[in-house]
């Protein structure tokens, strides 16, 4: 019990000494600024050097100390390396440093040096959501009852959505690479009508597909714009469909819970996108929004002909009819970007 009380007392004493030390450093910093304003630059440096680097626990005070060091070195025409080292330290503490943020009167000579230091985000985390219009590229007429169907009687519509979380790494030239993981959906409807005088019918086919989406992109960055080129791989996790068959004497609905066995549903796309960055304020910010326009072209077909034709009983029973279809996509998206880390060059 006595030992515990001793530990508590010692901790309290050390904490008090730390607080007193910080108060002393504030006074020293104030004296250094007064000497600087009077033009006593050497005297100001003596005060500033009595405080060790990063001894100040308050980032604001450490930035102010580094600013005074740089200003004094400029006035005394000291080596450029000493000036730039302190400016680098300011930007390491706060990559979004600005004179307005810290209420500092920065000399034009120091400001011109600050502009020579390149500060850029090298790790960016983003959340992206888009709404997509899917455009079919039909390579062949339907395999089943091809003689009964005209292209004029074939209609197709599809909408999809994408939700991704991405991590991008940017190089010194501001371009970067990005990879992510997400969830994608595709909802589409196709209607086929026969022109046979013997058996007139129509088949409406509605389906919802759900994918795990794996995008990889190269980013070409500009001041307010980004261009993305890359590829997406979509891995099917679930499919649900209904076939509405309407004929002269029959109206039937078939629910299809899993079409994986007759369709090649894991899809690959090549894509291109352009986005406009929107910053929350004129000053630098850790985050920003961007509006994107994306276009993608499917590399493989929705349908695997061999698998599809292997279940002819299923096709006959449900009037399931299909084409060799590749998908093109145009989408509008919104992206939230967070600059997780910066580099100084």
Image (cartoon, rainbow, N blue to C red):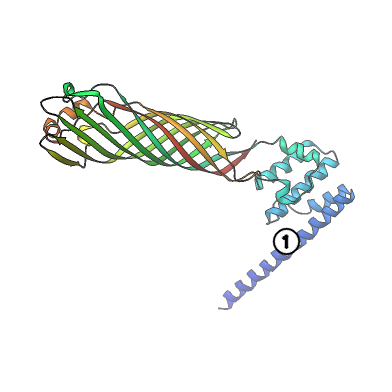
For mark 1, what is the residue?
22
Q: Residue at x 68, y 70 (%)?
A: 13
For the residue pair 311 and 65, the one nearer the viewer reads as: 311
Q: Quadrant of the N terminus?
A: bottom right
For the residue pair 32 and 294, the one nearer the viewer reads as: 294
Q: Residue at x 82, y 39 (%)?
A: 78
Q: Is residue 95 left or right of residue 212?
A: right
Q: Which percent across, then down, holds residue 242?
A: 21, 40
Judge the density around disc 1: few (<14), some (14-19), many (≥20) Cα neighbours within 10 Å.
some
> Is 99 above or below relative to 221?
below
Q: Quadrant of residue 16?
A: bottom right
Q: How many marks?
A: 1
Q: Is residue 80 left or right of residue 164?
A: right
For the residue pair 310 and 341, the one nearer the viewer reads as: 310
Q: Which percent across, then down, holds residue 272?
A: 46, 29
**Which element carries disc 1, helix, strand or loop?**
helix
Q: Which percent across, then down, holds residue 296?
A: 40, 29
Q: Quadrant of the C terminus?
A: top right
Q: Quadrant of residue 208?
A: top left
> In this view, which residue lies farthest toward the bottom?
1
Q: Which percent across, then down, holds residue 3?
A: 58, 75
Q: Is residue 280 left or right of residue 315?
A: right
């Amino acid at each position: 019990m006595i030992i515990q009380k001793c530990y508590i007392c010692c901790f309290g004493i050390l904490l008090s000494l730390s607080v007193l030390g910080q108060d002393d450093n504030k006074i020293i910093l104030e004296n250094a600024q007064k000497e600087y304003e009077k033009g006593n630059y050497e005297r100001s440096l003596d005060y500033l050097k009595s405080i060790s680097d990063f001894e100040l626990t308050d980032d604001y005070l450490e930035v102010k100390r580094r600013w005074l060091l740089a200003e004094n070195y400029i006035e005394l025409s000291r080596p450029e390396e000493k000036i730039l080292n302190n400016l680098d330290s300011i930007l390491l503490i706060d990559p979004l440093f600005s004179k307005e943020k810290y209420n500092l009167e920065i000399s034009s000579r120091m400001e011109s040096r600050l502009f020579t230091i390149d500060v850029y985000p090298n790790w960016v985390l983003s959340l992206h959501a888009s709404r997509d219009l899917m455009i079919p590229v039909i390579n062949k007429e339907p395999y089943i009852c091809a003689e009964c169907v005209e292209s004029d009687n074939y209609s197709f519509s599809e909408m999809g959505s994408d939700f991704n979380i991405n991590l991008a790494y940017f190089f010194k030239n501001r371009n970067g690479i990005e990879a992510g993981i997400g969830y994608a959906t595709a909802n589409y409807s196709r209607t086929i009508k026969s022109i046979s005088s013997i058996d007139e019918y129509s088949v409406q086919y509605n389906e919802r597909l759900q994918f795990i989406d794996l995008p990889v992109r190269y980013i070409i960055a500009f001041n307010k714009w980004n261009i993305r080129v890359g590829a997406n791989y979509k891995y099917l996790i679930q499919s649900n469909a209904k076939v509405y068959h309407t004929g002269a004497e029959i109206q039937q609905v078939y629910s299809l819970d899993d079409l994986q066995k007759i369709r090649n549903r894991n899809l690959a796309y090549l894509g291109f996108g352009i986005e406009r960055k929107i910053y929350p304020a004129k000053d630098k910010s850790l985050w920003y929004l961007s509006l994107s326009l994306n276009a993608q072209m499917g590399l493989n077909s929705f349908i695997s002909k061999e698998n599809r034709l292997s279940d002819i009983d299923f096709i006959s029973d449900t009037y399931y009819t299909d084409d060799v279809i590749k998908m093109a996509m145009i989408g509008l998206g919104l992206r939230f970007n967070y600059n997780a880390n910066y580099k100084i060059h």
